[in-house]
Amino acid sequence: YTATTQSEPGSFKTEITSQEIIDKLLPALREVVATGTAAAIKSDGLTLAAKTGTALKGSDKTKESSWVIAWYDGMHKNKLVLVLVDGPRTEGTYKLSVAKALLKAGAVDTPVITDAPASSDTTPSPSSKI
């Protein structure tokens, strides 16, 4: 994967919610990985949380913006992974393969340099669980 933009770490806003709200949401976001639309990113040894989404585009609904955002407990320097695929409906399925590779690389803190994986994602079309 090729980084198209690199920026310095920073925060747009901080303390935007309470720990109580985070504690309520986190189990649902972990369930998205355990049994939901991001199940394909499961990785041994990592407690992952994620949210997926898809927006159909165009009057004929042949295009989509499909995304996944994911992180794991103890992820290096509070980083997360966001993959967005924008294009024909058939192309958004590999977002989970890309996210999984990036999460694994973050777990060992090494860069990912590889070609985009062939799609083996058989996850059903994402629908919001939360």
Image: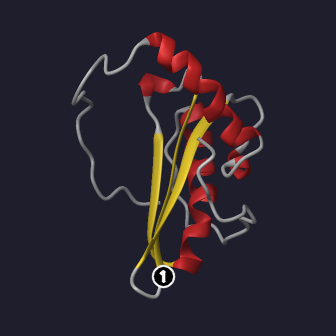
- Describe the colour scheme in one phrase: secondary structure
Mark 1, secondary structure of its residue: loop
Asked whether 28 or 34 is in front, the reply is 28
In the rendering, at what x and y percent does residue 95 appear?
A: 56, 60
Residue pictured at 49% horizontal, 25% vertical? 76
In the rendering, at what x and y percent does residue 8 appear?
A: 23, 35
Please give left or right for residue 27 compared with residue 111 in the image.
right
Residue pictured at 52% horizontal, 39% vertical? 110
Q: Amino acid at mark 1?
A: Lys
Crowd tier of the residue under label 1, counting other residues whose Cα lies within 10 Å: few below 14, some 14–19, many 20 or above: few
Residue pictured at 77% horizontal, 43% vertical? 35
Q: Relative to residue 33, is residue 1 depicted above or below?
A: below
Asked whether 129 or 31 is in front, the reply is 129
Please give left or right for residue 7 compared with residue 110 in the image.
left
Please give left or right for residue 42 compared with residue 11 in the image.
right
Asked whether 41 or 112 is in front, the reply is 41
Q: Relative to residue 42, is residue 56 depicted above or below?
A: below
Residue 127, picture quadrant: bottom right
Residue at the limit of the structure toward the bottom, as seen here: 60
Task: Identify residue for label 1.
Answer: 61
Q: Relative to residue 111, is residue 67 depicted above or below?
A: below
Figure disc tally: 1
Residue 59, picture quadrant: bottom left
In the rendering, at what x and y percent does residue 113 appear?
A: 51, 56
Residue pictured at 24% horizontal, 28% vertical? 10
Which quadrant, please, contains the C terminus? top right
